[in-house]
């Protein structure tokens, strides 16, 4: 499913994707990408969140997350844009954002990293694959609304902690 989403192939491209989106949340998935046919897209639109998935296209966790990202991309296109980043091809952010997990999803708005409290203790990123499309849409909407209000940390609509599971 990663072939359906735009890939960023350099640290400069990632920076430009984050900087170019004035009013949208940026979602970026970092990871490995061995697909050379993917196009690089940097949009200069405003009012949208940028979502970046960092990871590897061949990783099972990333494949699951990419399926969700690709299926919701059209639904959230008015307020969010999604990019994928291969963490081997673009290692520039691995240390800065502690990108050690198979799949990592981060949110950016107006050149600022938006943190989200998911109840897991790590407010910087989502480092597991969400399987429910509506759940991810709810998270993106929550991040977008909080970011528009100037908040750097938003509370997720669902608690993902394990304290109630045992």
Image (tube, rainbow, N blue to C red):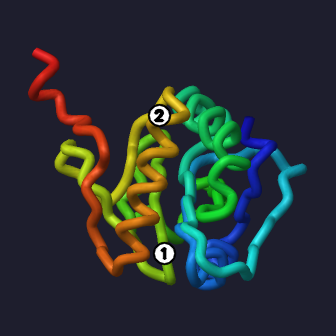
Q: Which residue is mark 1?
A: 109
Which residue sits at x=42%, y=79%? 112
* The disc label shown at residue 129, or none: 2
Residue 85 location in percent, x, y? Answer: 63, 57
**Spatial distance from mark 2 to mark 1, Cα to Cα?**
22 Å
* Quadrant in the rendering for residue 99: bottom left
Q: Position of residue 115 (x, y in %)?
A: 32, 64
Crowding at dot 2, Cα within 10 Å, few <14 / some 14-19 / many 20+, comes out as many
Vertical arrangement, residue 19 with respect to residue 14, above or below: below
Name the side, left or right, on which 51 lies relative to 158: right
Q: Residue furthest top?
A: 166
User: Farthest residue toward the right?
Assistant: 37
Which one is in front, 47 or 54?
47
Disc 1 secondary structure class: strand
Comparing 142 with 65, the one in front is 142
Quarter occupied by residue 101: top left
On the image, the x and y values in percent for residue 78 come to 67, 63
Circle 2 SS class: loop
**Residue 8 sits above or below residue 37 on the image:** below
């Amino acid at each position: 499913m990663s072939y359906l989403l735009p890939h960023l192939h350099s640290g400069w491209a990632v920076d430009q994707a984050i900087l170019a989106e004035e009013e949208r949340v940026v979602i970026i998935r970092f990871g490995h990408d061995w697909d050379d046919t993917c196009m690089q897209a940097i949009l200069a639109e405003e009012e949208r969140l940028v979502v970046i998935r960092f990871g590897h296209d061949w990783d099972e966790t990333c494949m699951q997350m990419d399926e969700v990202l690709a299926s919701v991309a059209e639904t959230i296109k008015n307020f969010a844009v999604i990019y994928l980043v291969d963490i081997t091809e673009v290692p520039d952010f691995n240390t800065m954002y502690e990108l050690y997990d198979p799949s990592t999803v981060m949110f950016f708005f107006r050149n600022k990293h938006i943190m989200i409290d998911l109840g897991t203790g790590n407010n910087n990123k989502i480092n597991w694959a969400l399987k429910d499309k509506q759940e991810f849409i709810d998270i993106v909407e929550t991040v977008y609304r909080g970011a528009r209000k100037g908040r750097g940390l938003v509370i997720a609509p669902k608690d993902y902690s394990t304290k109630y599971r045992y």
